[in-house]
């Protein structure tokens, strides 16, 4: 920090450790031999307009009284500029005594004036011993994204993007949280479900096996409740498709005009629940999809699966195995059985015997809806199970067929 002002912008999705990184940085600054100081201010989500200069007021405390003062001048733009200069002078004065770090948390929630003030400081701070550190989530509105892009390209401004942690690091993280004696399978399940998100990893490690922590679910549902009805319809429909949905398939299932569908999808992306994926959309994390899917009433869930199954059935080349699963979840066993049998026979044709066995199992489960295929179906399934290396299942199906 000596002789050079700096602005560091730390961005990343929720839970990746932005605040933790800032805490580590602040600790290093405080322990510096030259007695550097740290001021921390947070932005807060509020209904309507955010508090003017909120993070700066919080960071500077009683020294920020001039931010709210009215100097009585009629030219409002000139008064605003003087306010910005006063902030600059205050920071320079504080830094003259000892190096200063100003941490501004959650700038994605900050008011526009705070962002404009930060831009002004990034331009005007030069040799003052001042470091400004800002944290933002990746899910940004268009205006905040434009501001961030422009600011990040200025000299003296560095943007640090946090990515998801490798599984090996997540495993080390949860090892200190999970109870002693936790099985390897339990640890592996937590690591897989966390998908590189350290916050999710800690929450999952503290929860019962197989449960989605209430803290994660509550945060997800709070975001979902803030969406419009049309955006919620898009998010709900995508939640029934594990791997996301192409835009054209989404348009076939959610009955909105193209303009409204695009607006709704954009709202889902800006909320952080969805992300662009290829030519469509997917959830930013598997746990988010699970939380959304679980909150949908069973009757509506069946309807959403039916809409997706109908749309897939109308698309040439749709995977019959996928179609069978959605028909089954839609409560349409006749269609599910037919699709499962087709999927099994196609899998046999390409020598994908484990997949054939799985689809034959579903077809047999639903065989009471298609009695005419009973004995033949069991004989086919027994052969596929044998080729898949499952002699016990093959023998059981063969015996049922003979019976």
Image (tube, rainbow, N blue to C red):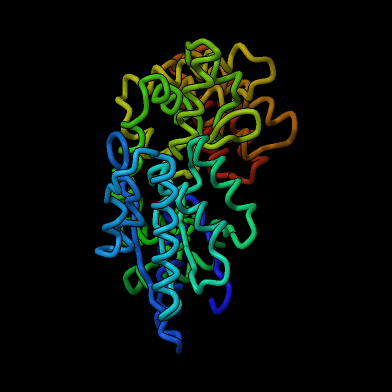
| Residue 67, horizontal then vertical, whole percent | 31, 53
Indicate whether 19 appears above or below 14.
below
Q: Nearer the viewer, residue 27 or 269?
A: 27
Indicate whether 191 appears above or below 290.
below
Q: Which of 118 and 86 is in front in this view?
A: 86
Q: In this view, does 380 lie to the left or right of 101?
A: right
- The residue at the point 50 percent across, 74 percent down is 129
- The residue at the point 73 percent across, 36 percent down is 351
Count of numbered badges drawn on the protein: 0
| Residue 379, horizontal then vertical, whole percent | 60, 27
| Residue 23, horizontal then vertical, whole percent | 40, 70
Q: Is residue 194 among what the camera can see?
A: yes
Q: Nearer the viewer, residue 15 or 60?
A: 60
- The residue at the point 47 percent across, 71 percent down is 172
Q: Which of 33 and 319 is in front in this view?
A: 33
Q: Is residue 186 among what the camera can see?
A: no
Q: Which residue lies furthest to the front in this view?
A: 73
- The residue at the point 42 percent across, 67 percent down is 91
Q: Which residue lies furthest to the right in this view?
A: 350
| Residue 252, horizontal then vertical, whole percent | 55, 14
- Dividing the picture into quadrants, the one containing residue 344 is top right
Indicate whether 84 appears above or below 278.
below
Q: In this view, does 154 lie to the left or right of 77?
A: right
């Amino acid at each position: 920090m000596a002789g050079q002002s700096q602005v560091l912008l730390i961005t990343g999705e929720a839970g990746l450790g932005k605040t933790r990184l800032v805490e580590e940085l602040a600790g290093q600054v405080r322990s510096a031999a030259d007695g550097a100081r740290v001021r921390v201010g947070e932005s807060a989500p509020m209904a309507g307009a955010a508090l003017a200069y909120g993070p700066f007021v919080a960071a500077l405390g009683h020294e920020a009284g001039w931010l709210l003062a009215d100097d009585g001048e009629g030219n409002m733009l000139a008064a605003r500029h003087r306010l910005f200069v006063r902030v600059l002078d205050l920071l320079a004065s504080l830094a003259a005594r000892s190096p200063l770090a100003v941490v501004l948390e959650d700038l994605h929630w900050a008011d526009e004036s705070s962002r404009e003030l930060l831009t002004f400081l990034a331009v005007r701070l030069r040799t003052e011993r001042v470091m400004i550190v800002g944290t933002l989530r990746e899910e940004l509105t268009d205006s905040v994204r434009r501001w961030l892009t422009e600011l990040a390209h200025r000299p003296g401004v560095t943007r640090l993007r946090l990515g998801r942690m490798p599984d090996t690091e997540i495993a080390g993280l949860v090892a200190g949280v999970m109870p002693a004696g936790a099985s390897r399978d339990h640890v592996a399940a937590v690591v897989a479900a966390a998908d590189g998100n350290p916050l999710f990893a800690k929450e999952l490690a503290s929860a019962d096996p197989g449960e989605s922590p209430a803290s994660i679910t509550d945060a997800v549902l709070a975001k979902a409740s803030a969406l419009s009805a049309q955006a919620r319809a898009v998010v709900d429909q995508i939640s029934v498709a594990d791997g996301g949905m192409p835009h054209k398939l989404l348009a076939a299932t959610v009955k909105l005009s193209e303009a409204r569908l695009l607006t709704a999808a954009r709202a889902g992306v800006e909320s952080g629940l969805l992300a662009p994926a290829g030519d469509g959309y997917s959830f930013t994390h598997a746990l988010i999809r699970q939380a959304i899917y679980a909150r949908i009433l069973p009757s509506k869930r069946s309807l959403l699966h039916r809409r997706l199954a109908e749309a897939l059935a109308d698309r040439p080349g749709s995977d019959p195995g996928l179609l069978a699963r959605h028909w089954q979840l839609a409560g349409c066993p006749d269609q599910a059985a037919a699709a499962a049998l087709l999927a099994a026979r196609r899998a046999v044709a390409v020598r994908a015997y484990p997949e054939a066995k799985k689809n034959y199992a579903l077809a047999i489960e639903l065989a009471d809806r298609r009695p005419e295929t009973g004995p033949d179906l069991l004989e086919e399934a027994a052969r596929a199970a044998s080729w898949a290396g499952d002699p016990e299942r093959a023998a059981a199906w063969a015996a049922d067929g003979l019976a």
